[in-house]
Structures are given as C-alpha cells and as structure tokens.
Image: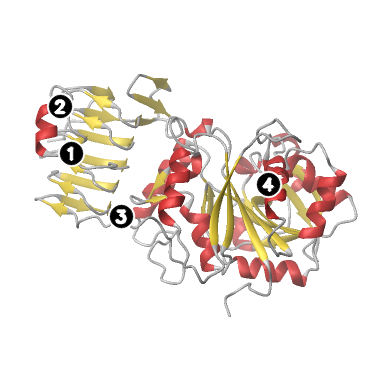
C-alpha cells in the first residue's frame, strides 16, 4: 500500500509573491519557476519531496508571472489513469465572496480551501515553492500524530543574522511551542534563544526558526480561519493565535540541509554548492529522486575544454577553453577560447540552426561567444553574449540595472533574452595573469 494512503493528507504548495528580491530572475517568471542545478526548477523540489514521501495529491497556488510555472507543471507531472495522484494548479481568482488576489500565505490557503471539499483528507501539508531541502514528510506526519498536535511546524536552528528574517519560537521539553515571534529585531533576540544540539550551539545557531513547512489537522485549520477571519499571514497571525489559544502546536526539529532561496546571493551560492565534491543537497541520492521534465535532449558535446568542479546538463555544445565551478544548463552553447568561473548558465529553451545564427548578425546567437571571460555571473535563459566579452562581478560593484543586465549583490545577472554585443566589458576587467 502506498505511503500515507491511510494517513490521508493533501499538500498545498505556495507559489510565492512577486519575488522582488530575486529580480531580475523573476522579471518574467515566478520564484518557483526559476531554474536551478542546470536542468531543474525550484518547484521540482517540494513536489519531489512529496512524491518521495508518498504524498501524491498536490495543489500549487499561483499568482504572479505564473505562465511558465503552469506550463512546466503541465508538461512534467503526469500520473497514470489508475492512480489517485495529481499536481493541480490553483490560480488566484476573483469570486463573488472575494475580489482580492492572495494577500498573504494564510489568505492564499483560505481562498483555496473550497477547492478541497471534494477530497478526503485529515491533514493539510503547507509548503513553500522556493526552498531547497530533502525531507520525508511521512516522518513529519507521524510526529504530528504522535504529539496529538493541531499544528506542527518544521523548525531548524539558525544564527542571529538569519534569525531576523524568520519566525522564531521557544520550545519546551515536550517539543511544544510556547511562544512565537515573526522576524524579531536584533535587539530582542537575547530572549529568544533555545536549547539546541551542541554542534549547532557551537556554530552560533541558538535560535529555532520556522521553515515555512506546516501540517494542520483539518478541523484545527478550519477553526483557526473562523476565529481569525481577517488574518492574512501564517507567521504574523495564525500561528501566534494557535499558540495563544486552545491549540496544541508542536515543533518538528529537522536535522538535514535546508536553505531559503530569498535573494540573488543566496540563489547564487546554493547553486554553486552543487559543484562541491559532496554537496549538502544531493541530486545523486537514489532514495530522494528530484523529478523534472523529461526533455529527450541529445548528450552534450565537449571540444578540448578543461572542466573543474562543474555541472554539465544535457544538450550542450561546449568549445570553451576552461569551465570552473560553473553550472552549465540545458542546450547551452559556449564558444572557443572562452572561460567561465563561478557562473550559473541557465541555457536555452530551443536550438538555433546554423542559418539562424548566421542571419541574426549583428545580434549574437544564443549562448556565449568566442574569447569571452565570465566570472561571478548568472546568465538567464536564451541570453546572447557576443565575442570578446568580459563579464566580471565583484562585491565592490554597486547595484545597478541596464536594459540587458543587472548587478545585484556583486553578481552580474544577464536578463532572459538579454543581448550583450561583441567587445562589451561589464563589471571589473579581467585580471592579468601574474608572470
């Protein structure tokens, strides 16, 4: 019998807001649709975690720039006719009872609850669509049931710097949450320290943060919504109301790797970490497969390129001189004598024919041209970088925006479909080799 068939649970995956902190990657797409790891999208992570945990009834709540996300889900997640699983899109909609779009996490779930009435479930798993982790939700549900909880929050230790960006809680010896504050200031953190494992305490991670992963018992969620009719957010309103009311709220201490993809810098570092010898997030884990769209692309071709600590996706044609600590996404093309270091290259949505490349002049073809040097950069889908181009990010560079690219947190981000002409220099000039 499949996991969780008797423990009846459905999952609601929140598509997020406008994603302004990930701009310009969210200029034309929602946060969960942002590509990661060369061939995946962020939404693949929570959906794969659900599938690996036996949770096969999923609703993805979308609102901003959702076309590419909807298309990816439609083209990727198909279930056989004799199963009970599905991944359905619940787009924000105006109704006779509400003319508003989603106003927050709680409001998004509240507006989606009517769509669940025809489904048999006892528990609702609420997830974010823009986090990187691998978790067994069956263990989370078992813990929720063992604790006889109305609401269970997955929690993780964080340091003082990160604590100001999360919901922070105090947990008693029985694993129950006694108090909760959303995004506390540095001045009030002293009173929010919690007992944590010695290794976490030694690393300065003395605060228990909400991961934005919740399990609600069905009746409890309905009652909380009735008692908090105007509540828009889980962290600011629903969770404190449950703790201060007659509800049992438990903390599930997660021990694995988890990161919130909130900024360009965090996105950049999380992706480059995939090139480590043994990355903390493991795409090679046979027990925790990350599922994505099967594109049926040809194998990649490499011509005289020196690769070091890099990830190469399918369908690429690489003539580069050197590729180091770089993610090379699907259908990428890199020209002769080019060098890439600390680069995330999303790749392309389609191939150009040789004739199309020749006819596109003076606009460069899709990909990276000849004799380029690119370092500390993100190259979004279908961007066109000419020959003899230097792109070199640095933390010394101020944030700025041009038509084809942005500099954010010291990282040069070439926009989707952005065109960088031959000979362009962006950021710092290439360092000359020492004799």
Above or below, comparing residue 187 to residue 422 in the picture:
below
- The disc, 1 or 4, on the residue closer to the chain's N-terminal end is 4
Q: Quadrant of the N terminus?
A: bottom right
The quarter of the picture where residue 76 lies is bottom left
Depth check: 293 or 45 in front? 293
Does dot 1 land on a helix, a strand or a loop? loop
Q: CA distance from mark 3 to mark 1?
A: 17 Å
Depth check: 256 or 201 in front? 256
Q: Position of residue 168 (x, y in %)?
A: 71, 47
Does dot 2 land on a helix, a strand or a loop? loop
Give the residue number, with chain letter if any, for mark 1: 352
Residue shown at 34% from the left, 51% from the top: 39
Tell me if mark 4 has few (under 14), some (14-19) or many (20+) residues whose alpha carbon lies within 10 angstroms of its own: many
Horizontal side of residue 356 vs 425, given as left or right: left
Above or below, comparing residue 9 to residue 313 in the picture:
below
Q: Are marks 2 and 1 in contact (CB under 8 Å)?
A: yes
Does dot 4 land on a helix, a strand or a loop? helix
Q: Position of residue 53 (x, y in %)?
A: 56, 68
Give the residue number, with chain letter if any, for mark 4: 112
Give the residue number, with chain letter if any, for mark 2: 360
Q: CA distance from mark 2 to mark 1?
A: 10 Å
Residue extending furthest toward the right:
246
Horizontal side of residue 165 vs 44, given as left or right: right
- The disc, 4 or 2, on the residue closer to the chain's N-terminal end is 4
Q: Are marks 3 and 4 in contact (CB under 8 Å)?
A: no
Residue shown at 14% from the left, 43% from the top: 320
Residue 125 can be seen, yes or no? yes
- The disc, 3 or 4, on the residue closer to the chain's N-terminal end is 4
Q: CA distance from mark 4 to mark 2?
A: 46 Å
């Amino acid at each position: 019998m499949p996991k969780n068939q008797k423990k009846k649970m459905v999952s609601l995956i929140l598509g997020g807001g406008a994603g302004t902190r990930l701009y310009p990657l969210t200029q034309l797409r929602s946060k969960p649709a942002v590509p990661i790891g060369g061939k995946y999208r962020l939404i693949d992570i929570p959906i794969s975690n659900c599938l690996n945990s036996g949770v096969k009834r999923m609703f993805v709540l979308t609102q901003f720039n959702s076309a590419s996300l909807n298309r990816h889900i439609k083209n990727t997640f198909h279930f056989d006719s004799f199963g009970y699983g599905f991944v359905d899109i619940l787009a924000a909609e105006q109704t006779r009872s509400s003319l508003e779009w989603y106003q927050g996490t709680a409001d998004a779930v509240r507006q989606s609850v009517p769509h669940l009435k025809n489904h048999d479930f006892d528990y609702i798993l609420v997830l974010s669509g823009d986090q990187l982790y691998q978790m067994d939700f069956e263990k989370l549900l078992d813990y929720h049931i063992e604790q006889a909880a109305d609401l269970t929050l997955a929690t993780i230790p964080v340091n003082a710097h990160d604590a100001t960006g999360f919901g922070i809680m105090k947990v008693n010896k029985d694993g129950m949450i006694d108090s909760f504050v959303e995004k506390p200031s540095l001045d009030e953190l002293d009173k929010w320290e919690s007992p944590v494992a010695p290794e976490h305490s030694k690393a300065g991670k003395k605060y228990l943060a909400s991961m934005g992963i919740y399990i609600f018992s069905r009746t409890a969620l309905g009652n909380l919504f009735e008692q908090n009719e105007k509540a828009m957010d889980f962290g600011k309103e629903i969770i404190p109301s449950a703790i201060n009311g007659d509800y049992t709220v438990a903390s599930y201490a997660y021990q694995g790797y988890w990161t919130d993809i909130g900024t360009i810098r965090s996105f950049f570092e999380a992706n480059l970490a995939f090139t480590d010898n043994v990355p903390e997030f493991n795409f090679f884990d046979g027990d925790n497969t990350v599922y994505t769209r099967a594109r049926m692309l040809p194998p990649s071709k490499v011509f005289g390129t020196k690769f070091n600590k890099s990830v190469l996706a399918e369908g690429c044609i690489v003539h580069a001189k050197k590729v180091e600590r770089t993610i090379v996404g699907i259908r990428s093309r890199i020209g002769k004598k080019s060098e890439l270091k600390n680069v995330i290259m999303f790749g392309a949505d389609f191939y150009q024919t040789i004739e199309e490349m020749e006819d596109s002049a003076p606009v460069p073809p899709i990909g990276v041209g000849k004799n380029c040097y690119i370092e500390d950069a993100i190259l979004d889908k279908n961007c066109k970088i000419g020959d003899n181009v230097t792109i070199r990010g640095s933390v010394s560079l101020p944030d700025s925006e041009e038509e084809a690219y942005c500099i954010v947190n010291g990282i040069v981000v070439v926009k989707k479909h952005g065109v960088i002409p031959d000979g362009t220099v962006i950021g710092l000039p290439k360092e000359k080799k020492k004799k």
